[in-house]
Image (cartoon, helix red, strand yellow):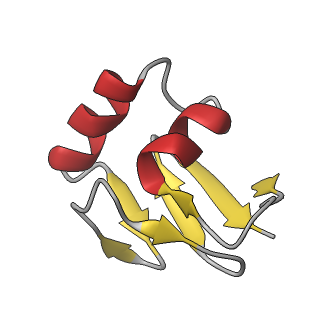
Amino acid sequence: MLDFTLEGEFIHLIQLLKAANIVQSGGEAQMVVSEGGVKYNGEVDYRKRLKVRRGDILECRGKLIKVK
C-alpha cells in the first residue's frame, strides 16, 4: 500500500494518479478512469474530477493508495 500525504483539503483523482506515479500523463490518467480502472473506497468510479480527501483509499493497476 502506498501512503499519499495530502497537502490541501483535496486533490483531483487525475492529479493523484500522476502524483503517485501510477500513470505518466494526464491523458493516460483520464483513459484509465474512463475505462473503469480505478476503485474509490471499494467501488469503481468514473469521475475524472473526483475530489479525493484524507482517509480515502484507491486501487488502480493493482496498487492501493491510502490518502493521509
Q: Is residue 2 left or right of residue 15?
A: right
Above or below: residue 64 compared with residue 10: above
Above or below: residue 11 compared with residue 27: below
Estimate the x, y position of residue 10 in percent, counting from the top left: 62, 68
Residue at position x 28%, y 68% in the image: 44
Residue at position x 78%, y 55% in the image: 4
| Residue placed furthest toward the top | 24
Residue at position x 69%, y 73% in the image: 9
Estimate the x, y position of residue 52 in percent, counting from the top left: 54, 69
Q: Is residue 62 left or right of residue 4?
A: left
Q: Is residue 52 left or right of residue 6?
A: left
Residue 55, by quadrant, is bottom right
Q: What is the quadrant of the C terminus in the image?
A: bottom right
Residue 50, by quadrant, is bottom left
Report the front residue among 56 and 59.
56
Above or below: residue 52 compared with residue 27: below
